[in-house]
Image (cartoon, rainbow, N blue to C red):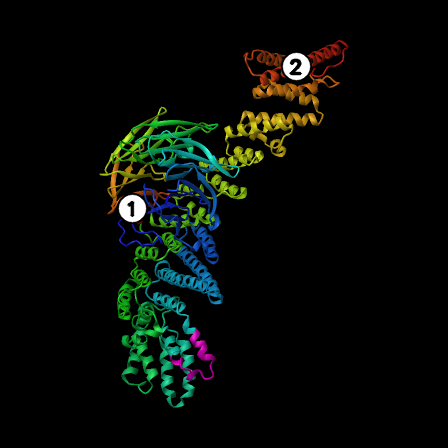
Amino acid sequence: MVHDAQMDYYGTRLATCSSDRTVKIFDVKNGGQILVADLRGHEGPVWQVAWAHPMFGNILASCSYDRKVIIWKEENGAWDKMYEYCGHESSVNSVCWGPYDFGLILACGSSDGAISLLTFTGDQQWDVKKISNAHTIGCNAVSWAPAVVPGSLIDQPSGQKPNYIKRFVSGGCDNLVKLWKEEDGQWKEDQKLEAHSDWVRDVGWAPSIGLPTSTIASCSQDGRVFIWTCDDPAGNTWTAKLLHKFSDVVWHVSWSITGNILAVSGGDNKVAYTL
Amino acid sequence: MEELDVEPAITNIPAASDGKHLGFAWGPGDILAYETLYMAPGSGCSFIHEVRKDEDIYSPILRKLFNESHHIFVGLQTIREDLPSKNKKTQFVSISKNYRSVIRACMEELQQVAVSTKVAEVATQYGNQVSILLAIELIWNLCEVLFIDAAPAGPLLLHLLDWVRLHKGDVDEKAREVLQSESPAEHHDYWDVVVSYVLQGRFEEARQMLVKQATLQPAARNMYKLMDTLLSKMPFYNPGGTQTLTEFDVKWRHWHEEVDRCLQDNSFASNQHLEIICKILVGDEDTLLEHKELLSTWYHFLVTRLLFCHPTVKPTELHYYAQSCMTMFLDLRSVPEPLDSILLAAFEFDIHQVIKDCSIALNNWWFVAHLTDLLDHCKLLQSHNLHFGSNLREFLLLEYASGLFTHHSLWQLAVDYFDNCPEFGHVYLELQIERVPLDTERKALKVLRICEQRQMSEQVRSICKIMAMRALRNNRLGSALSWSIRAKDAAFATLISERFLQDYCARGTFSDLDLIDNLGPAMLLSDRLTFLVKYREFHKLYEENRFSEAAKLLLSLITAKIAPRSFWMTLLTDALPLLEQKEVIFSADQTHELMFCLEELTSSLNTTAPGTDRTMQVRISSCTQTCNRLQIKILRCKSAITIAMRKGKNAPGF
């Protein structure tokens, strides 16, 4: 049973993960399908995979029921474990790489209710920050906000590293959608968005098309998909709009690259396109 | 969000069985779908299906359509706003004709392949594409007549006649067949051809055909003469002439009365065919409808009816006639096809409906995007706000161009489309261009040039970084260095310079000398890089036996302290051969500075913490030895200088 399939940035490679505990990587250039790697290391069904930005090389993260997050890297044509994180006490349900502007940083959501942030600091070292009890009972999904520099309308003097505000959204078994912000090196809960009446299964932060608005999609066990929008750049007032109520659990939401289409996957075996 | 008022099409994914979920992921031009169970282990079908919406961009013949229409599009965008509207209209009509000729050319090519291929699948596929293009051209042509050319009453009918004639090619085919036969007037299709000509208002040709019949029936000569006269006297409005519309109308009515009189007089009663033609000329609806097969479409019926009942029809009256003609013609079929609705919407001058229906009916945005763009330039679209605020034209162009982006070479066309979308084009381009696979250096440079031209500095940085990393991983240091210079990435340039220096220490030679020697001001990007370049320069000077310049450079490198600390020993060691030259190279001041640096280095070595390991100690001691040698050399040099001074000879450096 395949649990997740993700194309890399360019659509030339496909990574899949499965109940059989493996992560497989295929070369799909020009309509072909060549198995490039069969990665073994997890001891339970693997729930999600995520490709990092190509500027860091070929790097893939996977998370599994076995409570582990493994980061794989391709070196000289061969895939190998780059890092293994075992700091969760329960199944890790979701992994998501941050925008490349932040460097190599991975958010992981787990059934133990915690969210961990793994940052690559160079020379095979990873820095770990953990947000315990992010969602009571468990965290099901994490998704990063696009990189935005505060006051980015003003020119930054070149050569200086801009001060990015790192934000991401998470959804959990407490029926909540939470926004997190990094301040002074610490992660703080920024917003708590309530609208769902059952476990939030997936969240997705829409890509930025240059407007000052931010948009988040969330879907839940209660069959509802909400679209959250915030018009002020400070990110304080969020309004929910019900996109649709489906007759069954909605498991997965995903924005297209330009954020004009939201794909939704529900328990009634359908994938709906919304413009 | 606008409500969808049409049920979205359902695409079935095979092998997604009951009780399982449908997983999906976005691909660049498609969606991946697979059977799964969310958050529950299990077994099942392990296939992943690729769902692709638009196959057209992969068709080699259609690619010409995209390429050539791109060319026309770009030209259209440059039409100056300040031209007088009359000139602009002519230009717009000409551009519209250009687009249509491109469609026709493509259609012909597809038709040729469809006919000549032996593969049934290909024939069907291409045949379908031909039908679609035919419909597209039909619609476009009508839009050109009604919206762009916007002919008033009078010329309007003439244009519509042209339109119908252009899209009913089988008449000429049949005519050819009949004329090439032994006795055309006795051919079984003869009368069909004559009637078809009349229905299309092609009276000259009808008359020529009739002559053949007339010669066969000398007894009926008068009847044929009469018909010939009627046909020749039918007035056609001349747009370029001096006659006003009213005058034409009067003339036409006279003629119409004359034809009617012939009917009433039973002038053609003895010849069934001529009688039918006379009834057609008088515009008898029932007779027209009896010839549905020859008319074949309701819009042909519409134009013919207008020709013989109301040639001075006004644009605003069209929709009434169109609706009634369609109803009369299609009485057997209950639901009109999409094409019919689109044409009807056009006759009703409901441009938005036309665009909307076309968008739904076709699976490729090409047609609606280009047509809407042209109509927008003609200022025919009211601003029609969509969900995310961009106007209709921009929305369609963005969708079309985004579709092109997934193609390995057509993506370059998409750039121009994005450039001409003022609101979101830039950001769409930013998001899409990062996804173009950088398979080769050449392609990367192409992408880069596009980004640089548009001041997309983020993307430039990102692409250069990706290429630099890739080169570094493949040990192509020179390439990595030039990419990081292009990215203006000081940190990376430093990293690569260190690698170069390490290489040098290991092998004693530099790689990529061409690059390093010709960096110019780029070398100032990072201190380490500057050092690398200057160090290499030192070696060059030495090889060219320009010792005093080499010495000066070396000394400046040592004293400027841009060398990494680990390199100091190497630098001082490099001074050795210079000191060993027979000639005294260094001046007194220079030797002073050398001594000073040496002392600093020696003291740092001596203050190394105790307990350092054996290898470290070995290194330190060998360093110390070299230092001692240096000291001796320098002192010898110094004394040589002093001697030279005493002897009155000019020592170097003075």
The disc labelled 2 sits on which kind of residue? Gln
The residue located at (30%, 83%) in the rendering is: B262
Q: Is residue B641 above or below residue B349?
A: above
Res. B383 in view: no
The chief SS type of the magenta part is helix
- Measured from the top left, where is residue A50 in percent x and y? 40, 38
Q: Chain of mark 1?
A: A
Q: Is residue B442 left or right of residue B136?
A: right
**SS assignment at label 1:** strand
Q: Is residue B244 left or right of residue B587?
A: left
Between B625 and B370, the residue placed more toward the observer is B625
Question: Range of the magenta residues?
Answer: B173-191
Q: Residues within 10 Å of mark 1 (few under 14, many from 20)?
A: many
The disc labelled 1 sits on which kind of residue? Gly
Between A118 and B496, the residue placed more toward the observer is A118
Residue A266: assigned label: 1
Q: Residue furthest bottom?
A: B219
Between B584 and B204, the residue placed more toward the observer is B584
- Measured from the top left, where is residue A176 in percent x and y? 26, 35
Res. B440 in view: yes
